Image: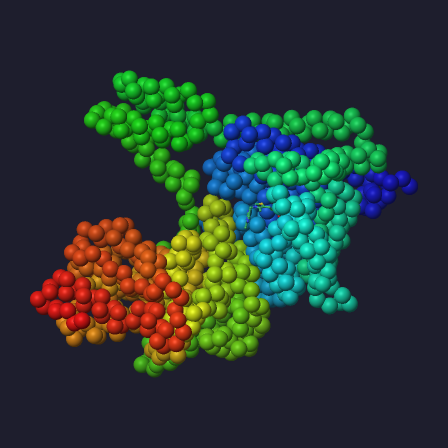
């Protein structure tokens, strides 16, 4: 038997069928390579802004695609175009549309032009925002650019398979649309240099602990942009250093494989072995693909001749995977030179046509807009305007900015004209604004009927006046939630066995099982990623970050991944994660922070709830579980042991987001605050009342969304004076609140005094009760600021105290 017969027999195929598959793969890698080559030209000639391509990684991706099945998920990075072509989740024309930034999601399905090319994703959602039948399609979570940030999400995508497998309650409709009893594998891809990131290591360790079906491929081309492996990886080999993770004697760990990026037969064999272990044994597997090349260098931003040696460049030519596959086909007599030449020529032609078509499609609607605008401009008789019109007409490949600049220039020039063309031009501009808002700015939050702004509130009911600790209210409400929603799981550090550091989950693991309420390692970033991946697969994770101060470890994932998911896919993916944490003041530098400005600025796209007590916190959990948006809920640390009236409708009462509560009506000053500062404000108000100063106290309750009915400005209309109190640094969240009330709600019109913010000191809160008193605003501070303001207003009535 000759070599090709052996290979065909191994694959259990007839020789002809085997040949067909091989030549199909050869054609695919050629098409992908040609796309990269042409793509670079498109950038260098200015048609596209930036290019980062998958050349050199084609063959490994074709091999990986062969074991990727319906229901599986990918979480990868910008090199994976060949894989996306191979699983038929992307075609060449769409790929070029991505390079150009075509804003029509029908043409550019990855992100509607929002992400730079090479950021891949499939559509998980129907037009109404509901999940599609994910088990009957091939899925890719949407890529992000920060290196290794795909890893934490990958953990969650894999963990979802584990959860579906062990949770028998979720093996029927609608959950059977998301998983077939957990048989799905999550595929990760990462470049060798990105394995230097902490996120990679945290994910590797967590997946090893959890033993989830995750297949990670490392595309090892020896460099991270220009920096070689000797500066990236101990022993210059990721599989070498990961050896301690290798499973032994039936124990936990990884199965680790090594292969070469140019060796078609070995790649295919390796992926077959790897998937067998991963899918059948439901354990993590790592495939280290070595000897991968990067023929055009890292991206269009530079050339690799600057940092690769002559020898390396020559080696890359010799071991180019397209060249190597060609030689392998000939050596195995699967095709001759002419046949392969024909395939290569055909690939070139196909890619050229796809590129031309994508460019024409990209340009057509813009040119259409140019035509509309020019026809309006030509109606205006004015020399300068004619020149603008001519110039616009002369641009061969216009962008929308050119049209807008022209229209706005004309409107400035024709200020004193009352022609109908000018009116039509204004009309055109207004319509364009709506269209461009949809093109570039839609879906920061959900646009489905489950969006937060559609949520229906439901009042808290009290059967009697019984008072209980705040933590008991949370616990009983989580009990009701876990009972009502089988798709909810709650996890974090100490959340399982002991029921949380503040006992808000006391006894719930025992009641609902270790798979519903569980402990995790100390790994905030992957707790977040675990939640993101779970939520992307139809589950409703409540992820605990033990203290607000430690949210920073997870904040990058919240900001780069979670907050942008709906926006960066133009509503084609979602992850309605609920993040539970506790914060504001308690004791010590890292248990008292309240960096709310940092959070609201980093996390537009995530709801940020700052309840003052646990009844409201519980109400937010209940509301959010009816919605499909992510949220952060910060439970006030000092309220777990404070008494609150015990509700009787746990799991049912819903507190709306974006609706402040006026806790006390008053006439002199509007005092706006939230969270633990509410109690400080209330204490100060008691002191101020003794001086007949009347305060209207508003608890914002949520920072994102912010006071959707403009209640703050309504109060300001009455009091004409505004004080904002919080525990963030000066100019932190209080500046955000001022921008909202003064600018957005136009509160400046009603001010009779300068608005004032009361915040913490610029340093972290010092330890102890005195540390708190001198670091954070207290009732005396609030009294002083407000009393002094009243002195300014009416010095006769309010004489200076000191
Ligand atoms: C957090 C972060 N730091 C830096 C960058 C800039 N950057 C983009 S790609 C890259 C190198 C990645 O190399 P590697 O992981 O080996 O993947 P390759 O591009 O070689 O396939 C760097 C440094 C980034 N995107 N994200």
Q: x, y (%) of residue 381?
A: 27, 18
| Residue drawn at 36 percent across, 34 percent down | 432
Q: Position of residue 165 (x, y in %)?
A: 63, 63
362 relative to 73, above or below? above
Residue furthest bottom in the image:
466
Left or right, 800 with respect to 657, comes to left
The residue positioned farthest toward the left in the image shown? 796
Residue 278: percent from the left, percent from the top? 70, 57
For the N terminus, give its image quadrant: top right
Nearer-the-camera pick, 62 or 257: 257
Give x and y (percent) for residue 795.
11, 65
Residue drawn at x 47%, y 63% is 551
Quadrant in which the C terminus appears: bottom left
- Of residues 390 and 89, which is closer to you in this image? 390
Residue at x 73% of width, y 68% of height: 251
Q: Residue furthest front?
A: 802
* Residue 103 sits above or below residue 193 on the image: above
- State left or right for residue 221 relative to residue 329: left
Q: How many marks?
A: 0
Q: Is residue 187 left or right of residue 700?
A: right
Q: Does residue 416 lie above or below 287 as drawn?
A: above
Q: Look at the picture and state if 500 lies above or below 158.
A: below
Q: Is residue 774 in view? A: yes
Residue at 58%, 29% in the rendered image: 41
Please indicate, yes or no, whether residue 651 appears anywhere in the rendered image. Answer: no
Left or right, 83 with reference to 645: right
- How is this picture coloured? rainbow
Q: Quadrant of residue 697?
A: bottom left
In-front residue for pair 363/314 = 314
């Amino acid at each position: 038997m000759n070599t090709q017969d052996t290979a065909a027999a191994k694959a259990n195929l007839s020789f002809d069928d085997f040949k067909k598959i091989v030549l199909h793969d050869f054609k695919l890698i050629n098409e992908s390579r040609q796309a990269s080559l042409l793509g670079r030209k498109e950038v260098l000639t200015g048609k596209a802004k930036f290019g980062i391509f998958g050349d050199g990684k084609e063959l490994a991706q074709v091999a990986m695609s062969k074991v990727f099945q319906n229901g599986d998920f990918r979480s990868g990075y910008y090199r994976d175009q060949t894989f996306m072509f191979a699983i038929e989740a992307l075609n060449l024309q769409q790929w070029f549309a991505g390079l150009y930034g075509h804003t029509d999601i029908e043409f550019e399905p990855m992100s509607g032009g929002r992400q730079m090319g090479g950021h891949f994703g499939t559509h998980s959602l129907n037009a109404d925002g509901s999940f599609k039948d994910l088990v009957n399609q091939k899925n890719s979570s949407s890529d992000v650019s920060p290196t290794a940030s795909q890893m934490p999400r990958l953990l969650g995508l894999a963990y979802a398979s584990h959860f579906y497998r062990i949770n028998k309650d979720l093996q029927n409709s609608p959950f059977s649309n998301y998983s077939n009893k957990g048989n799905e594998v999550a595929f990760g891809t990462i470049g060798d240099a990105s394995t230097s990131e902490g996120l990679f290591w945290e994910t590797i360790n967590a997946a090893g602990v959890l033993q989830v079906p995750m297949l990670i491929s490392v595309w090892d081309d020896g460099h991270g942009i220009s920096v070689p492996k000797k500066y990236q990886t101990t022993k210059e080999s990721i599989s070498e250093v990961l050896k301690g993770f290798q499973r032994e004697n039936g124990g936990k760990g990884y199965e680790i494989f090594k292969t070469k990026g140019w060796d078609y037969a070995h790649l295919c064999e390796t992926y077959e072995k790897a998937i067998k272990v991963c899918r059948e044994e439901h354990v993590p597997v790592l495939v280290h693909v070595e000897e991968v090349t990067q023929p055009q260098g890292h991206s269009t931003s530079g050339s690799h001749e600057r940092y690769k040696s002559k020898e390396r460049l020559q080696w890359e030519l010799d071991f180019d995977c397209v060249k190597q596959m060609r030689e392998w086909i000939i050596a195995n007599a699967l095709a001759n030179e002419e046949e392969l030449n024909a395939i290569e020529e055909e690939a070139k032609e196909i890619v050229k046509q796809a590129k031309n078509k994508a460019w024409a499609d990209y340009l057509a609607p813009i040119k259409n807009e140019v035509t509309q605008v020019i026809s309006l401009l030509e109606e205006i008789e004015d020399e300068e305007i004619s020149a603008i019109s001519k110039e616009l007409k002369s641009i061969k490949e216009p962008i929308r900015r050119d049209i807008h600049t022209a229209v706005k220039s004309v409107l400035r020039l024709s200020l004193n004209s009352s022609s109908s063309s000018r009116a039509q031009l204004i009309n055109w501009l207004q319509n364009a604004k709506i269209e461009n808002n949809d093109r570039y700015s839609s879906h920061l939050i959900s646009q489905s009927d489950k969006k937060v702004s559609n949520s229906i509130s439901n009042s808290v009911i009290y059967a009697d006046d019984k008072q209980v600790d705040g933590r008991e209210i949370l616990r009983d409400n989580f009990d009701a939630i876990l009972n009502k929603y089988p798709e909810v799981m709650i996890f974090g550090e100490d959340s399982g066995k002991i029921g949380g550091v503040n006992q808000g989950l006391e006894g719930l693991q025992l009641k609902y099982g270790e798979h519903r309420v569980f402990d995790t390692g100390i790994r905030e970033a992957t707790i977040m990623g675990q939640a993101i991946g779970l939520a992307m697969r139809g589950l409703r994770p409540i992820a605990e970050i033990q203290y607000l101060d430690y949210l920073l470890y997870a904040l990058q994932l919240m900001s780069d991944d979670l907050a942008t998911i709906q926006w960066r896919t133009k509503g084609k993916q979602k992850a309605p994660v609920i993040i539970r944490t506790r914060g504001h003041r308690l004791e010590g530098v890292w248990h008292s922070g309240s960096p709310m400005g940092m959070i609201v600025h980093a996390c537009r796209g995530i709801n940020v709830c700052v309840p003052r007590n646990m009844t409201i916190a519980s109400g937010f959990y209940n509301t959010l579980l009816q919605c499909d948006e992510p949220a952060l809920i910060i439970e006030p640390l000092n309220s777990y042991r404070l008494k609150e009236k015990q509700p009787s409708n746990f799991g049912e009462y819903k507190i709306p987001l974006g609706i402040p509560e006026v806790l006390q009506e008053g006439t002199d000053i509007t005092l706006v605050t939230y969270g633990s500062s509410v109690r400080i404000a209330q204490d100060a108000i008691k002191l101020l009342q003794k001086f007949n100063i009347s305060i209207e106290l508003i608890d914002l309750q949520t920072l994102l969304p912010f006071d959707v009915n403009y209640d703050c400005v309504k109060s300001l209309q009455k009091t004409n004076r505004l004080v904002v109190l919080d525990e963030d640094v000066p100019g932190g969240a209080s500046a955000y609140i001022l921008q909202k009330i003064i600018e957005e709600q136009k509160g400046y019109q009603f001010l009779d005094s300068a608005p004032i913010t009361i915040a913490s000191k610029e340093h972290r809160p010092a330890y102890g009760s005195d540390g708190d008193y001198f670091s954070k605003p207290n009732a005396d501070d609030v009294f002083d600021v407000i009393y002094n303001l009243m002195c300014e207003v009416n010095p006769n009535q309010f004489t200076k105290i000191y």
